[in-house]
Image (spheres, grey):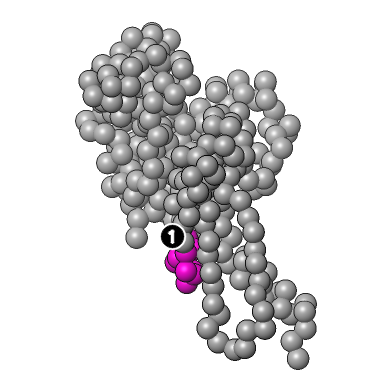
Amino acid sequence: MKTTADSLRLVYRYLEGRRDAMQALLRELVVLESPSHDLPALERMARRLLPEWRSRGTRVTLRQPRQAGPILRAELDPGRGRIRGQLLILGHLDTVYEMGTLQHMPFRLQGGRWWEIDDPQLLAFKEERLPAGTAPNPLIRVPVSFETDTLAPHLAPLAGDDRALVVLEGVTMYLSDDALGELASTVRTVLPRATLVCDLMSPAFGRTFSRSLRRELTRLGARFGSRRRHPRHLIEGAGYVARERHSIPGRAREAGTLPIPGWIFHTLLRGLRDGYAVWVFEPAG
């Protein structure tokens, strides 16, 4: 005889097996942003959820009252057994907060273990001001030179089939094509299910829009890697597929720190818009 506790354990196992997918969908919905009184944003959210309900075997209708937000109605008929009654579940589409709230209150998942791998001098600088022991989650800092050291021995203790998140921030433009390709291949081998997030700069952007900055950084001792083609191709060649791209100048323009008219930004300055961005890669296959 199946008890209530047995049923709850089955539900828990079912949900635990779908944790990654649920968290990914939750993040996507939060990032959409749908303030309570922003009707276009609410409609965007409703249209995003519509296929989610439809893919789960429900009959879905989207109603749009003239002076109110959209109403998404999903009906599910079990299709077997005797139906004793009906169950009504009510929810809301809005994430409530105003547009732009994510800038100072981003989506976060608590917990996890964190490793920070960076140049020895930078880690010493950080440790002096932000000691790893004060981090809210366990943090281990590993000094390494990306251009001359092999990353594999440092990643070997982390090897596994975890759904890890690897962030390469402020690194790729200092690496040669060979070094960046080897780095991506190493991450793909050691953490085959990891999502890779990195800021990438096209060669044209480096030559055109960041020339003075690169010249100043070079004067201070920085060395930029030679780049023959867009670095995304090197990462894709290591076994990844690009899933998202977020323009860094575009976000600066949205925040008001890059006052360029939209029609110029999206036509004459597409090289600026698309040349420097945060890319999100997933394992291919």
Query: Which percent across, then down, holds residue 9?
Result: 71, 74
Query: Which percent across, then down, holds residue 112?
Result: 64, 48
The range drawn in magenta is 52-60
Residue bearing the label numbered 1: 51
Few, some or many residues within 10 Å of mark 1 (<14, 14–19, 20+): few
Q: Amino acid at mark 1?
A: Pro
Query: Which percent across, then down, holds residue 69?
Result: 53, 45
Residue depicted at 46% across the width and 39% down the height: 40
Residue depicted at 53% across the width and 53% down the height: 71
State which quarter of the image contains the N terminus: bottom right
Question: Relative to 100, does residue 239 appear above or below in the rendering?
Answer: below
Residue depicted at 35% across the width and 55% down the height: 284
Residue 181 lies left or right of residue 120; in this view the side is left
Foreground pick, 123 / 68: 68
Q: Is residue 231 at least partly visible in the picture?
A: yes
Q: Is residue 184 magenta?
A: no
